[in-house]
Structures are given as C-alpha cells and as structure tokens.
Image (tube, rainbow, N blue to C red):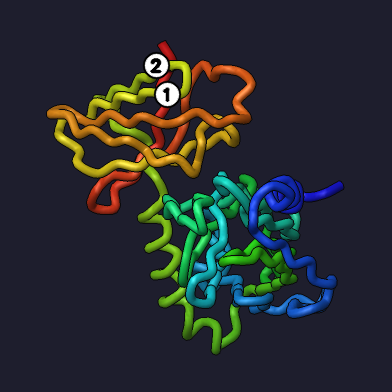
Amino acid sequence: MMSRIALRAARVCVTVPVVLLVASSTAGAQAPGVGSRTGKGPHVRVELIADRASAGPGMRLGLKFDLDPEWHIYWQNPGDSGGPPEAAWTFPPGMTAAGIEWPAPERIDIGGLVNYGYHGTTVLPVVVAVAAGARIAPQFTVRTSVRWMACANVCVPGKADLALTFPLSAEERGQVAGWKAAIDSARSKVPKPAPAGWRASARSTADTFVVDIVTGSREDHAILFPLALSQVNDSAPQAVTPRPDGVRLVLSKSSQLTKEPATLRGVLSLAGGRAFTIEAPLR
C-alpha cells in the first residue's frame, strides 16, 4: 500500500509541473535497519534528539530536519502537493510515541502551487507517553523509521532509520541543553487552543467560505491553514479584512470539495508569531 506521502505526491504530480524524483531504496539514504542518531537524504539532514539525558515521564523527543536553501518539508496538511513526514517508532514496553506536535507552518509558493511546510532548520517535537507503573529498563534504545518528502522545483522522497540509546553517552549529554532549547522553541510555535472568549463562524457562498473570527482586538495580519485536505483552494490568495474586534478571511473553495463541511477547522496564524487552532461552524 502506498503511504500518504506517495499517494498525495503521485496525485499532484500527474497534473502540475512538479517533478517527482523516485530514488532507489538506498540512494542518498541510510541503509535500512542500520539505525544511528543521524541520517540524510537528498537536500535533507535529519537527527533524533531528546530533551533529557535519562528517559522518564514528560520526556519529548524531536525530529530535527536541516534543509538546503530553497528546499522545504511539509506540515500535516501539505497544501497543493507533497506529504508530511511520517515516523514508525519502536519503544520498550510501557512507552509509546503519542504523536507529533506540529509547529505552525509557512505558506510556501512554488511556481503558483502553495504548500504548507517548513524551510531551513525545523524540529518536530514528539510526545512520549509512559504508562502508569511501567518499569523502564535502565538502558534501552528508541528506534524510528522516518520518511519525508522534500521539495523545491522538484520533489524528492527520503528515508532514514534513526536510533537513540538511553542513558545518553557523554558526548550526547553535552548536547542535551541545545537539543532541549530546540525542542522548546519548536513547541512555542505549536498552535494553542483559541481563547475561551474568541468566537469563530463561517458561511458558505457559491465559491468561497467567509470566516469571521472575533478576538477582541483588530487583527491586521492573518492566514488560515486548513486542517482538512481538499476543502480550500490552497493556491488561491486569502482575502483578509481587519475588523475592530478581529478579522474576516475569504477562502476560495477547492475544486475537489464534494460535500460542505459542518465546521471549518484550521490553524489561524496572526501577527507576532501567534497561532491558534480554531473551529468555525458553517451557518
């Protein structure tokens, strides 16, 4: 079965001028099953990092991506093309990966296609859940098989098998402060729930969704990143109208929209690096 990355890329690359380079399973990537803390693929370096030297409740890992200039990877909704990074984890009994905490993305225009993703150096924090009463061995290894799609004017899939052994080595312990700072910085960009006093609503016209968000103050800058695929025309400009108590956005509907949603869900990015999850019921 094709992964979500491959399916999304294959569908888009049939219809738009983005070239998908299909590499062999070993070209430019780490050999499957080897497992080290770092890996690489074309135009991408990836690391497995942690926010502490010894595992325990509340621990977070991070997938740190370093991309060549002009290249990007994807958010959970990739936009017009591509697909988000995917990771399959192996933990000792009693520990699991509870999911990626996705920082708010950028809106990336590549020749008229608009993607949602990240440039430069990006850390994707990963929450580690520890079962109550679990007895964690004093030494163990966390492993993950990571797949991603990196794009510029072409799209290239990548894969790395990463591993991190606890307790960390002396060399790794010397890097933990920097790793923790990088994970904490990424977590500060993860959208927060909209404040209780905010109100969001939407109405549908023939070709658009008109979204009104009341924040209590004028918002001069806003971008809405939809969480669901194929509801909004990602490449269309978003018309933003500041209001005394918030903002209005007009979003063009996707040509692939088959059914009106009951609620529009997304991430609202505002001036000053603020980002919030919103739910706007259609009325």
User: Label 1's element?
Assistant: strand
Work out whether residue 83 can be spotted: no
Circle 1: residue type? Phe
Q: How dense is the environment of label 2, judged by Cα within 10 Å: few (below 14), some, or many (20 and up)?
A: some
Earlier along the polypeptide chain: callout 2 or callout 1? 2
Task: Residue lying at the far bottom in this picture: please name it.
Answer: 171
Number of residue marks: 2
Instruction: Say left or right for 181 vs 61.
Output: left
Instruction: Say left or right for 129 vs 186.
Output: right
User: Label 2's element?
Assistant: strand
Q: Residue at x 39, y 45 (%)?
A: 191
Question: Distance between the Cα atoms at labels 2 and 1?
Answer: 6 Å
Work out whether residue 20 can be spotted: yes
Task: Residue lying at the far top in this picture: please name it.
Answer: 283
Instruction: Say left or right for 253 vs 3.
Output: left
Q: Residue at x 43, y 52 (%)?
A: 107
Instruction: Say left or right for 238 vs 32.
Output: left
Q: Which mark is residue 199?
A: none
Expressed as whole percent of the image width and height from the top left, the position of residue 43 reads: 61, 76
Circle 2: residue type? Arg
Expressed as whole percent of the image width and height from the top left, the position of residue 260 reads: 55, 17
Expressed as whole percent of the image width and height from the top left, the position of residue 239 reads: 32, 35
The image quadrant of residue 128 is: bottom right
Q: How dense is the environment of label 1, judged by Cα within 10 Å: few (below 14), some, or many (20 and up)?
A: some
* CB under 8 Å between discs 2 and 1: yes
- Disc 1 marks which residue? 209
Q: Residue at x 48, y 82 (%)?
A: 175
Q: Which mark is residue 203?
A: 2
| Image height of 199 relative to 117, above or below | above
Expressed as whole percent of the image width and height from the top left, the position of residue 98 reads: 61, 47
- Classify the position of the C terminus by image quarter: top left
Q: Residue at x 60, y 71 (%)?
A: 48
